Every structure is written in structure tokens, then in C-alpha cells.
Image (cartoon, rainbow, N blue to C red):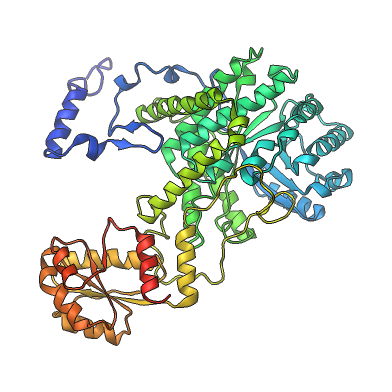
């Protein structure tokens, strides 16, 4: 073959219509739209395949890394990000020792959480002892009322140490609207203090102080497009407030930093960060900034707490690992991986080490830091980026047309929107339309809570949730919480035994027994599976011998007409009787007195609550 000939040149590439024709044949008459087209929660359809022609009208694939509008990232020749770990400062000496220790273990970004009453020059001196602030990123977060004081102390410390101002990287966290969303507090008076804080730190171009914490929305259950659209509106609110107060547009933009969450939707999250950078750059450009670098969106990404679980908690590592991968590939500034045990305890040294190493593995072993925007050119990711950008922009415009983000928060429309999504997602989880591995799907049958309980949230003043709230607030309830509460209640009250009466068709009885075991174990029930019985009498006798509280007959739809009623009558009320499935003869079975059926269309959570009530649990 000539070197000029292209490989496979003799093959004719099929057209899109030929692909569709082939799919139609393979579907054997099934509806293409219903079977293969995914309608996302973000409000757009995803096709089963994409081709080059699908990108012909998109401008994003033509963008270059490190150039406006930064859809392909802020760097030109690498994908570096800061590996961050947050430290709650109880004792400054201990916090300093911990920081120095983890800096030697791969972390290059520290986030100190400082109580407002503890802010002082002495604390800063102790906290930052031997930490090279010109080498590592350090961010600080304290009570909003003490942020200005902390900023002034830090500036004096930097000057005392003689640091190059451009080499100080990090932030002083200031986000009044976040407190309004989380606690319903009226912090509007604090927004007026932002310009002074920005002026205090203006000589430190890489030390940002105005934060947009949309990770709060993520951890309250928001859909991706909601986090994206509200992030733009939130950031624009602060840009408008600062520029209206006389702050130069470039300085205002370079003072803003975004803290965004990462959900489990792998490809969609990659697209979210790409779309966010692109749209934010367009917004900032409208303020007539002089430097395109002012249009860069600086993002600290944190893996979600919304999908973390108390039971089977090691699965949290799987969730956070894919989340970390998607954020890294999307090109973020810094990242926090939430320790797998954060839902039920103060993270241990072990869980924190695992969280650090999750980033180090993808960085040092998988080299995610070497390649700029590896998703670029992927027909699928480019489509998701464009679709999310369009839907996110619609939400942004809607907020702006209604008076801006601050006004929307005051009216409660943002909170209502996110809370409605949270309620919907909890409903979907109850029906297993949204899977939580290890909780509402494939639970660990033998696991006990062993005293683990969900961690209560506290506000910045140190009190548990419940401060006075003139505004609506977000209801941040983890997705698994309903199932966990049910399972813990069962464990603390009485653990019933569910016995699988398997009979008839081998394949069907095994499949339905497995389904039923998974279904009932979601409430912590003890489940006993079996190889099969020759007669229903034999099965019922075995169940009673095992002291079963529930007997689940598992067979094929056709055979239920033969086996279910005799089994129910022979059991004679000595245990709850359940049919696994929704057979055609269901009405006949109900007429005979059988009232319990479990199948894929059931609301699992409500069904299990009902069974608990019947069993006196």
C-alpha cells in the first residue's frame, strides 16, 4: 500500500441515515425515541450516537487551550491542579502540624476553617509557621463578620515575611449569599463590605476573596444545569455589586472564585465545567475588562456529599473517584475529595489519607495532569457541553430578568427550585429510578450500623442548624437518608426474617429470589434464599422452621396461578405472604386474599415502611 493511501480508504463510511436504518431493523419495531434516546434531567435529549456532522455548527471545538473563552481550560500546555485538603482549626498548633504533615504527603493546597472568635495575629503566626506560602496554595475561611479582620492580618503577615505578592495563591472566603441559602439568614448588609475586602487584597492578584459556593446547591441535590445556571447568576451578582461600588472590572473579576460540586454523572460533569468556563468568560467580557485573563473562571471542585451513604460506606470511594476523574479531566484549579466516612463521623486519618491518594493516583499514576482537555473533539462531550451551555444560559437569563440572583434568593425562588429537585430525587430513589449502590440497590445483607449515625450540620457560629431564618433555606438531605433512617429503625426495633419460597421455573425463581432479597434487605431485613422446593407445603414448613416473619413466593408468572393460592392458604396467616412479581393473575390472587406484591414498579421505600407497620416494627 502506498504511504499516501489512507488506511481503510477502500471502505465507504456509512451515512447517519444508514446507521438509523440499521438500528430500526435491530429494534424490531420498538420506538427509537423511547428505547434509545435519553431525556436528561437537564432538559435536553441525548442521542445513542453522534457523528462529526453533529458538531458542524458548534464553535467550541475550534477553541484553543488557555485562550478565550477558556472552554478548553485555563492552561495552554498542562492540566495541573492543586490537591487540596481542608483543616478545621480547633488548636492552631495542631492544625499547623497537620498541615505540614500532609504537605509532605502530596497535598499542595490547604484550606483552613477558622472560628471567627479565634481570628488574631497570633493565630495566623502559629497557623502558618514553616509553611511556604510562595510554593503552596492556602485558603482561609472564617465567619463572614471576621473576614475583613483576617484579610488585614494576613496582608501584614505576608509583608512581614517578604513574600512576592504574585506568588501568594489562595483565598479569603467571603460569600454572604451562601449563608442566606444554607441558613436563611439575612446577610445582605455584608454584601456592602465586599469592596473594602477586595481593595485590601488588590495587590495580591492570585489571592481571591469573593466566593461563589455552588457546591452548596450540589450538596442539596441540584441537577447539573441548576448548579451551572445559578453559578453564573451568583457570580454575576457579585460582579455587578462590585463594579457598581466603583471596583475596576478586571479587579472585580480577578477577585471571584467558584466552589463547585461534582456529582456522579461522569461525562455530564466534564461538560459542566467546560460550559461554565465558556459562559463565565462571555459574562465577564461584557464588563469591558481590559485583560482576557480576567475572564478565566477559577474553580475549586469538591466531590459531592449528597450521594454519600452511611451503610456500605466504602462505596463512597467509588463515587468520589469517578467524580474526581471527571473534574480533573475537565480542567479545574483545585480539588477536594470528601473522605468516604464524612457522612457519619469526623474523618479519620485513614479516610483522609485515602481521599488524598485518590487524587494522587490519577495525577501521578494516570497522568491526568499532563493532557489538556482530553475530552475535546469527542462528539459526545462536545454535544453535552453545548447542550448544557444552552440550558444553563436560559436559567441565567431567567434569573437576570427577574431581578438578579440576590433578589431571587430573597424571594426564595432559588431555594424552592433546588428543594423541589431534592424532593423529586428522593422520590426517584424511593422507586429506584435513581440508584444508590449499597443502599436502595444491592445492599450488604449482613451489615449493621454499629452506632453510625448521620453527622448533624452546624452553622458558622457553632450552633446546630436551627438559627433564626427570615428567608427560605435549602433542605440539604442526603439522598440515602430515608433508607438509612428506615434501616436503622428496623435494626433498633426488630429485624424480621424474610424467607424465599422458591419453586417452579429455575431461571425465574432464582431471578425473583435475588430481586426480593435485594428489595427487602434495603430495610435491613434478614433474608434467606433457597435452591428450590418440590411443593409449596415443603417450602412453607421450611420457612416456619426458620421462624420467618415474611414468606416470599418466587416463581414464574404462569406458575403463580398454580402455586400462590395453595401456599397462601397453607401458610394460614402464620407469617406475612408476599408474591415476587406482578403476574397476569394478580387480580385472582388478590381475590383470594393475597395483598402483598413486590416488583420493579413498586415504591420500595413506601412498601418497606408499610411492611414494617404490618409487622409492628
Residue closest to the eye, 549 or 316? 549
Q: Residue at left 59%, top 30%?
A: 405
Indicate whether 62 appears above or below 51.
above
Q: Nearer the viewer, residue 463 or 354?
A: 463
At 22% from the left edge and 82% from the top edge, which residue is drawn?
A: 571
Quarter of the figure with the N terminus = top left
- The answer to whether one can see residue 368 in this image is no
Give percent across and percent down for residue 350: 61, 60
In the rendered image, the vertical position of residue 447 relative to residue 574, given as above or below: above
Answer with left or right where residue 189 lies relative to residue 310. right
| Closer to the camera in the image, 581 or 166 | 581
User: In x, y percent, where is residue 313?
Assistant: 50, 60
Residue 39 in the image: above or below residue 530? above
As drawn, is 538 to the left or to the right of 121? left
Q: Is residue 75 visible?
A: yes
Rendered image quadrant of residue 524: bottom left
The percent coordinates of residue 572 (x first, y second) are 22, 83
Q: Quadrant of residue 2?
A: top left
Q: Count the labels in the image.
A: 0
Amino acid at each position: 500500500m502506498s504511504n499516501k493511501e489512507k488506511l481503510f480508504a477502500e471502505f465507504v463510511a456509512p451515512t447517519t441515515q444508514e446507521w438509523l436504518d440499521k438500528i430500526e431493523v435491530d429494534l424490531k419495531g420498538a420506538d427509537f425515541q423511547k428505547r434509545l434516546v435519553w431525556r436528561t434531567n437537564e432538559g435536553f435529549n441525548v442521542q445513542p450516537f453522534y457523528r462529526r456532522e453533529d458538531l458542524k455548527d458548534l464553535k467550541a471545538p475550534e477553541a484553543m487551550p488557555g485562550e478565550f473563552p477558556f472552554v478548553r481550560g485555563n492552561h495552554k500546555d498542562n492540566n495541573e491542579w492543586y490537591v487540596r485538603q481542608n483543616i478545621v482549626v480547633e488548636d492552631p498548633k495542631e492544625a499547623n502540624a497537620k498541615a505540614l504533615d500532609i504537605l509532605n504527603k502530596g497535598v499542595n493546597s490547604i484550606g483552613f476553617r477558622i472560628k471567627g472568635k479565634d481570628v488574631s495575629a497570633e493565630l495566623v503566626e502559629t497557623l502558618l509557621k514553616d509553611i511556604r506560602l510562595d510554593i503552596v496554595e492556602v485558603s482561609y475561611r472564617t465567619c463572614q463578620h471576621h473576614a475583613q479582620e483576617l484579610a488585614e492580618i494576613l496582608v501584614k503577615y505576608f509583608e512581614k515575611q517578604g513574600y512576592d505578592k504574585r506568588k501568594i495563591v489562595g483565598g479569603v472566603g467571603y460569600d454572604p449569599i451562601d449563608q442566606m441559602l444554607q441558613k436563611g439568614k439575612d446577610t445582605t448588609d455584608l454584601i456592602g463590605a465586599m469592596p473594602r475586602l477586595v481593595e485590601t487584597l488588590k495587590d495580591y492578584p492570585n489571592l481571591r476573596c469573593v466566593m461563589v459556593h455552588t457546591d452548596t446547591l450540589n450538596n442539596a441535590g441540584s441537577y447539573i444545569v441548576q448548579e451551572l445556571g445559578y453559578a453564573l447568576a451568583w457570580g454575576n451578582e457579585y460582579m455587578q455589586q462590585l463594579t457598581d461600588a466603583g471596583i475596576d472590572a478586571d479587579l472585580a473579576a480577578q477577585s471571584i472564585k467558584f466552589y463547585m460540586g461534582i456529582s456522579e454523572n461522569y461525562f455530564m460533569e466534564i461538560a459542566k465545567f467546560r460550559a461554565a468556563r465558556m459562559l463565565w468568560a462571555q459574562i465577564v467580557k461584557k464588563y469591558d475588562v481590559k485583560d482576557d485573563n480576567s475572564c478565566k473562571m477559577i474553580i475549586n471542585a469538591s466531590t459531592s456529599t449528597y450521594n454519600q451513604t452511611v451503610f456500605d460506606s466504602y462505596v463512597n470511594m467509588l463515587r468520589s473517584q469517578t467524580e474526581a476523574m471527571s473534574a480533573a479531566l475537565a480542567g479545574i484549579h483545585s480539588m477536594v475529595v470528601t473522605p468516604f466516612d464524612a457522612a457519619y463521623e469526623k474523618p479519620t486519618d485513614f479516610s483522609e489519607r485515602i481521599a488524598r491518594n485518590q487524587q494522587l493516583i490519577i495525577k501521578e499514576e494516570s497522568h491526568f495532569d499532563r493532557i489538556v482537555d482530553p475530552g475535546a473533539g469527542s462528539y459526545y462531550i462536545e454535544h453535552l457541553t453545548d447542550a448544557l451551555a444552552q440550558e444553563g444560559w436560559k436559567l441565567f437569563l431567567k434569573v437576570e430578568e427577574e431581578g438578579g440572583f440576590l433578589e431571587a434568593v430573597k424571594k426564595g425562588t432559588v431555594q424552592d427550585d433546588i428543594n423541589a429537585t431534592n424532593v423529586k430525587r428522593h422520590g426517584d430513589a424511593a422507586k429506584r429510578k435513581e440508584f444508590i449502590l449499597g443502599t436502595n440497590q444491592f445492599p450488604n445483607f449482613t451489615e449493621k450500623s454499629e452506632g453510625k449515625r448521620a453527622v448533624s450540620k452546624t452553622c458558622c457560629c457553632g450552633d446546630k442548624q436551627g438559627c433564626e431564618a427570615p428567608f427560605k433555606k435549602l433542605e440539604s438531605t442526603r439522598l440515602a437518608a430515608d433508607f438509612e433512617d428506615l434501616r436503622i429503625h428496623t435494626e433498633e426495633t426488630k429485624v424480621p426474617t424474610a424467607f424465599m419460597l422458591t419453586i417452579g421455573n429455575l431461571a425465574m425463581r432464582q431471578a425473583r429470589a435475588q430481586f426480593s432479597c435485594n428489595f427487602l434487605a434495603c430495610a435491613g431485613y434478614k433474608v434467606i434464599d433457597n435452591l428450590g422446593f418440590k411443593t409449596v407445603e415443603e417450602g412453607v414448613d421450611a420457612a416456619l422452621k426458620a421462624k420467618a416473619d415474611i414468606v416470599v413466593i418466587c416463581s414464574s408468572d404462569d406458575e403463580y396461578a398454580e402455586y400462590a393460592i395453595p401456599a397462601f392458604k397453607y401458610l394460614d396467616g402464620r407469617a406475612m405472604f408476599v408474591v415476587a412479581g406482578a403476574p397476569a393473575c394478580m387480580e385472582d390472587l388478590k381475590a383470594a386474599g393475597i395483598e402483598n406484591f413486590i416488583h420493579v414498579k413498586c415504591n420500595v421505600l413506601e412498601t418497606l415502611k408499610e411492611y414494617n407497620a404490618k409487622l409492628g416494627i
